[in-house]
Amino acid sequence: MDYSETLLFQNVSEKDCQRMLTCMKAQKRSFYAGEEIYSFDTPRKIVGILLNGQAAVIRYEYNGTRSILENLSPKSIFGEHLSFVPSDDSCIAVVCQTDCQVLFIDYQSLTRTCQNACSCHTQLIRNLLQLLSDKTRSLSERVEVLSQRSIREKLMCYFMQLAAGKNSSTFELPFTMIDFADFLSVNRSAMIRELGKMKKEGLIQISRRTVTLL
Amino acid sequence: MDYSETLLFQNVSEKDCQRMLTCMKAQKRSFYAGEEIYSFDTPRKIVGILLNGQAAVIRYEYNGTRSILENLSPKSIFGEHLSFVPSDDSCIAVVCQTDCQVLFIDYQSLTRTCQNACSCHTQLIRNLLQLLSDKTRSLSERVEVLSQRSIREKLMCYFMQLAAGKNSSTFELPFTMIDFADFLSVNRSAMIRELGKMKKEGLIQISRRTVTLL
DNA sequence: TATATTCTGTTGCTTTTGCAACTTTTTTGT
DNA sequence: ACAAAAAAGTTGCAAAAGCAACAGAATATA
């Protein structure tokens, strides 16, 4: 794998990159679809970077409710330092939806210049800044959707984000309907009912996972 | 003002600090309670750092709905690069709730080493990393609250965050009831009704803005 | 200190959402 | 190509949340 292709090692030579990976106790691991990648219940001082595949931060409430807190695409970063705190009656984990590969890095050695003082570490921190800034942005988008009051408003808000992202009024939903409802934190059948109404009212077109805003 | 007291200029000498502030076209501005500090409608390539006072990121929907997307305490960072995208039927702004002071910095010169190549710039980026990591964490907490399904669950989730933050089961709400409802994205009277029920059921004690978890 | 304004808390009614149980369609695995 | 499993979609009913119009309390202002 060419690590310099990942955002984190952007503008770092492959050679420096390998040296730093050792220095930072980096581990690459592969997971099968459905496997748990990371649990926030037993937090470790590491960050994970999704190299490829699709994953999600999921909260399982003990009453059976499931919520998708965050949808992770390749190059997303996650870890205890950056994220969620499980409560007494829930557990939170990163679960992969497709097979995927993850790079785990020790957070301390990532943010602090090591004794070997690799000059390229500065570049690394700059890259990390970019990753975090992206994460902030995606979490803000998430807050925008979830702070909408009705199911219809949540749907429209998210659709507009997807449309803006693709720069097109037609786009694909990255979820099954089940996951989509858990992502919006609403009841699945109520959501499908609302989608039906919006379709009938001529607000959207939707077939399978393809949506068009009208 | 001693800038080295702000998180951003932590471990930077006052002298270096002043030099960099010039280099990064930093501006300190004061605002009165209720004033708009920053609007996401006409985004500028700057970040703001709240030096003191209380502010909030607020979305005004044209149908009259108001939502508090984020609550900003001193040392919080905000700006176009990190945050919210207003839609066609809403506008988003940072509004201060008390008098406050804000430091505005050009984002480009903050993240890129300038020609003068101040050695201390590395420290600055490290500090910025910390600010962003804090922001990520607070946004994640926000997502956790908003992804709760019922008003009661939202209330309890937020109360537990406040309790964890103060390390005490008694804490103060940082809002009026009106703002609190807008923060949880729920109807005010429904929220107060629910608080009443929770009190009656012995889940919490509440008088004015002081809450105790039982 | 009187008056206006904002905030808090109540209540009945309406609308939306959630829930459960079900059928139909699609996907997966052998 | 078939069976089994998972996902998508429907519906009636129940529960929760929203809304509007209040009254009383607290706060600000003149």
Image (cartoon, coloured by chain):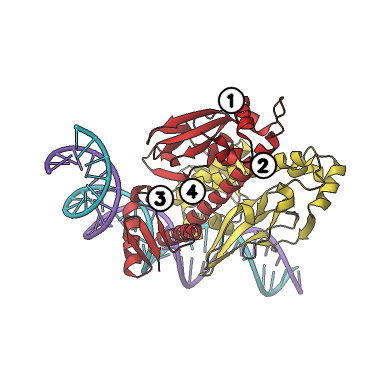
Chain colours: A red, B yellow, C cyan, D purple
Q: Nearer the viewer, residue D2 or A36?
A: D2
Foreground: disc 4 or disc 2: 2
Q: How dense is the environment of label 3, judged by Cα within 10 Å: few (below 14), some, or many (20 and up)? A: few
Cβ atoms under marks 3 and 2 closer than 8 Å: no
Badges 4 and 1, same chain:
no
The answer to whether the residues at label 4 and label 2 have Cβ atoms under 8 Å apart is no
How many residues crowd mark 1 within 10 Å: few (<14), some (14–19), many (20+)?
A: some
Q: Position of residue A136 (x, y in %)?
A: 58, 48
Q: How many marks?
A: 4
B170 w.r.t. D10: above or below? above
Helix, strand or loop at mark 1: loop
Q: Earlier in the sequence, mark 3 or mark 2?
A: 2
Residue B114 pos. (x, y %): 78, 48
Q: Distance from label 4 to label 2 (Cα)?
A: 36 Å
The spot of residue A155 in percent (x, y) is 42, 59
Q: Which residue was labeled with disc 3? A: A174
| Residue position for label 2 | A126
Q: Which mark is residue A25?
A: 1
Give the chain of mark 3. A
B183 displayed left or right of B75: left
